[in-house]
Amino acid sequence: MKSPETATSPNPDAAPASTSMPPADPRSSSPADVLPSAPPRTGLSPLRRTLALLTLCYLGFLTPLASTALLVAVPEIAAEFSTTGTIINISNALFFVSMAVSPMFWGPLLNVIGRRPVFISAGALLAAFLAGTAAAPTLAGFIAFRVLTAFQGTAYLVAGSVVVGDLYPPESRGRALGWFMSGILVGPSFAPLLGGGIVTVTSWRVIFWVLTGMAIAGVALIFFFLPETMPTNPEPLPGFVPLCRLLNPWLVIRPLLFYPNLWIAALAVSSLIWNQYSLLTPIRYVINPRFDIESPIKSALFFLPPGLGYLAGSIVGGRYSDRIVARFIEKRGRRVPEDRLRAAVPLMALAVPGSMVLYGWAIDKEVGGIPLVVIAMFAQGFLQLCCMPSLNTYCIDVMQEKGQSSVVVAGNYLTRFLFAGAASAACLPAIQAIGVGWFSTISSAFIAVNAFLLWLLAHRGERWRMERDT
C-alpha cells in the first residue's frame, strides 16, 4: 500500500476522492441534487497546490484574528465608548452569531458562482468593513462594522475547507486540512498578542487598521495563487434553477436536522469551540487578578501557550487522522468516512476534559503557580486540535460524492460559531457566579458527553447514512 501523500508534497496523479453522480430530478430541494458532482481537481502541479494551501492557511488565520485581537484591549475600547467590558464581550458574541449565520449564504453560493469569486468578493468586503471598524465614531457603529466583518470573514473558512476537499484525495486530506485548520485555530490565540502590543503603545484603532492591510494582502494572494477549483459539471444543468432557491438557508439547515451523522459531528466540534473561546475570552479577567498582572502585553503572553498547542495539535492531529484512515482501509479493503473519527474519541473522552479541569481548579484554588497554568493551557490547545482535523475532514468526506461538501461544511460552521458566540457572552458572567473551577468542570462534562456520541457515530454512522438515504 502506498503511504498517504503529505500536504506539502501533493501527488497530482492521486486517485480522485469521489466519482461523478448522474443528474438528479431538478425538482429536488437540494443544490447538490441539481448540480452534479465531479472528481476533485488533482491536475495542479505540486507547487501550485502547495501555494494554494499556504494561501488558504493565511486566509484562515485572518478571520479569527479579527475575532480575538481586541480581547486584551476590551477595557480601553469600553472606556472610549463609555461602556463596560461585558458589553464589549457581548458585541464579540454578536460577531460570532454573524459568523454562524453567514455560511447559510456563502455555502450554497460556492456551488453557484464558484470558489474563487466567493474568495475575492468576500475579501474585498472584509477589508472595507475592517476599515469601518477602525474608524467607527460610536459604539453602535463599532458593533455594526464588527458584525459585517464577521459575515464576510466566514466565507474564507467555509470555502477554504471545501477547496482543500477539491485539491486533495481523502487519504491525505486530513494532513492538508490540519495545516488549514492551524491558521483558523491558532489565529484566536496569537491575535491578542498582536492587540496587546499595539494597545500598549498606541490606540486600539490601530489594531483594525493593521487587520485592514492584512485583508488587502489576502485579496492579492487570492488573485495570484488561488485558482478556481470547482469541479466542472459533467453535464448541463437540468433546467432553470432560480438563484434564490439555491441560496435558501434551509439547504444548510436541513441536513443537520435529518442526518444524525451531521448533527453529532457538529456538536462534537462545537463542544471543542465552546472550550476554546471560554478559555481565551476571559483571560485578562481571570489571569490578571490571579498573578497581579496589569500590563496588556504581559497578559497577552498567556495566549501563547494555547496558541502553540493549537499549532502543534493541528499538524499532529492531521497526520494521525490520515494514519487511522490508512489502517482501516487496509483492514476493510475500502474507505469508510466514519473511521476517521476514531482518532478523536479517546482524546475527547479523557484527555481534553482532564486538561480543562486541571486548568480551572489550578486557577480557582491558586495552586501550581504560572508553570502549572501554562502547561494546562498548552495541553488544552494541543489536545483540542488533535481532534479537529478528524472532525473537519469528516464533514468534507461524508457527502462529497453527493456534491454536498460545501453545504455540510456550512452547516458545521453555523453550529460551531453559535457555540463560540454563546461561550464569549456567557463565560465571564458564569465564572464570576460559580468560579473558573466549576465552569471548567461543566465544560469538560459537555465534551465528554459528545465523545460518547462521537463513539456511536464512529461505529454506527455508516449504517445510519445508508438507512437515511434509503
Image (cartoon, helix red, strand yellow):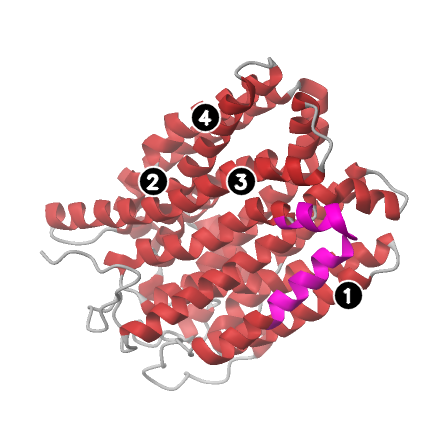
Q: Residues within 10 Å of mark 3 (few under 14, many from 20)?
A: many
Name which quarter of the figure residue 225 lies in: bottom left
Residue type at mark 2 is Leu
Nearer the camera: disc 2 or disc 3: 3
Give the residue number, with chain letter if any, for mark 1. Answer: 132
Tell me the number on the disc at residue 304: 3
Sequence order check: which comes first, mark 4 or mark 1?
A: 1
Precedes in sequence: disc 4 or disc 2: 4
C-alpha distance separating marks 2 and 1: 44 Å
Reading the image, the residue beneath label 2 is 457
What residue sits 46% from the left and 70% below the top? 31
Q: Is residue 465 left or right of residue 441?
A: left
Q: Secondary structure at mark 2?
A: helix
For badge 4, the amino acid type reads Ser
Provide the secondary structure element on which disc 3 rests.
helix
The alpha-carbon separation of the residues under discs 4 and 2 comes to 24 Å
N-term mark: 2 or 3: 3
Q: Amino acid at mark 3?
A: Leu
Indicate whether 312 appears above or below 1.
above
Q: Residues within 10 Å of mark 1 (few under 14, many from 20)?
A: many
Is residue 204 a member of the stretch shown in magenta? yes
How much space separates mark 4 and mark 3, taking CA atoms? 16 Å
- CB within 8 Å, label 4 to label 2: no
* Sooner in the amino-acid sequence: mark 1 or mark 3: 1
Magenta residues, start to end: 194-216
Q: Are marks 2 and 3 in contact (CB under 8 Å)?
A: no
Q: Position of residue 100 (x, y in %)?
A: 60, 53
Label total for image: 4
Mainly helix, strand or loop, the magenta region?
Answer: helix
Label placed on residue 355: 4
Q: Position of residue 13 (x, y in %)?
A: 19, 73
**Foreground of the two, 312 or 2:** 312
